[in-house]
Image (cartoon, rainbow, N blue to C red):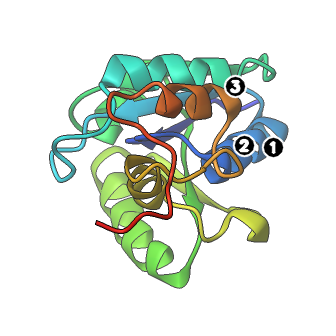
Amino acid sequence: MATVLYPGSFDPIHLGHLDVIEQASALFGPVIVATMYNPDKPGGMFTIGERKAMIAESVGHLPDVRVEAFTGLVIDAAAAVGADFIVKGLRTSGDFEFELQMAHTNESVTGIRTVFLPTSARWSFVSSRFVREIAQYGGDVRHLVPAPVARRLAELPGHTSRTTEQP
């Protein structure tokens, strides 16, 4: 069996991410989910430690999945855990174009190849950015995120239920 690294900011993890993790686990066996600090996405909703904890709780049903936190380059994280492949989830053709360029770059530097897994169609519209935005305005995201994430979002300071009142 191969060991694969599934990197991302996961701020927060959602059901599309979980779908890719489950697929990777079924295909490869050992999966290391790496929550990464992304300098292009400063000011996240959750700290790396909070993300790691939510991911770990969300993948508890998958015995071959481990969660780690890293800063820096994905290729360094892959080398640190001895990954044979990097796994990336794809939702749209736009994801493919960006991820393909990154996959070629990573392979040219390290020789580690990237495997693309399309998320199930039912989750192809979900993004962490939209989950954060909906949650910040008090919207219900329980159908988009694992239960541990839904609980954590509901606990955020200032989280209120949506009302019909206008300002």
Mark 2: which secondary structure? helix
Number of other residues with Cα within 10 Å of mark 2, as a class: few under 14, some 14 to 19, many 20 or more:
many
- Identify the image quadrant of the C terminus: bottom left
Q: Nearer the viewer, residue 162 or 18?
A: 162
Left or right of 137, for residue 29: right
Q: Position of residue 6 (x, y in %)?
A: 53, 40
Q: Residue at x 46, y 48 (%)?
A: 138
Number of other residues with Cα within 10 Å of mark 3, as a class: few under 14, some 14 to 19, many 20 or more:
some
- Amino acid identity at mark 3: Val
Q: Which residue is mark 2?
A: 24
- Identify the image quadrant of the N terminus: top right
Left or right of 32, for residue 44: left
Mark 3: which secondary structure? loop
Q: Nearer the viewer, residue 56 or 116?
A: 56
The residues bearing labels 1 and 2 have C-alpha atoms spaced at a distance of 5 Å
Hey, which quadrant is residue 118 in on the image?
bottom right
Q: Position of residue 156 (x, y in %)?
A: 39, 28
The residues bearing labels 2 and 3 have C-alpha atoms spaced at a distance of 12 Å
Question: Which labelled disc corresponds to residue 132?
Answer: none
Which comes sooner in the sequence, label 2 or label 3?
A: 2
Q: Residue at x 40, y 53 (%)?
A: 137
- Amino acid identity at mark 2: Ala
Q: Residue at x 34, y 53 (%)?
A: 106
- Amino acid identity at mark 1: Leu
Q: Nearer the viewer, residue 83 or 117?
A: 117
Q: Which residue is mark 3?
A: 59
Mark 1: which secondary structure? helix
Q: Position of residue 161 (x, y in %)?
A: 51, 45
Q: Which residue is mark 1?
A: 27
Left or right of 51, for residue 71: left
Circles 1, 2 touching at the beta carbon (< 8 Å): yes
Q: Residue at x 46, y 40 (%)?
A: 12
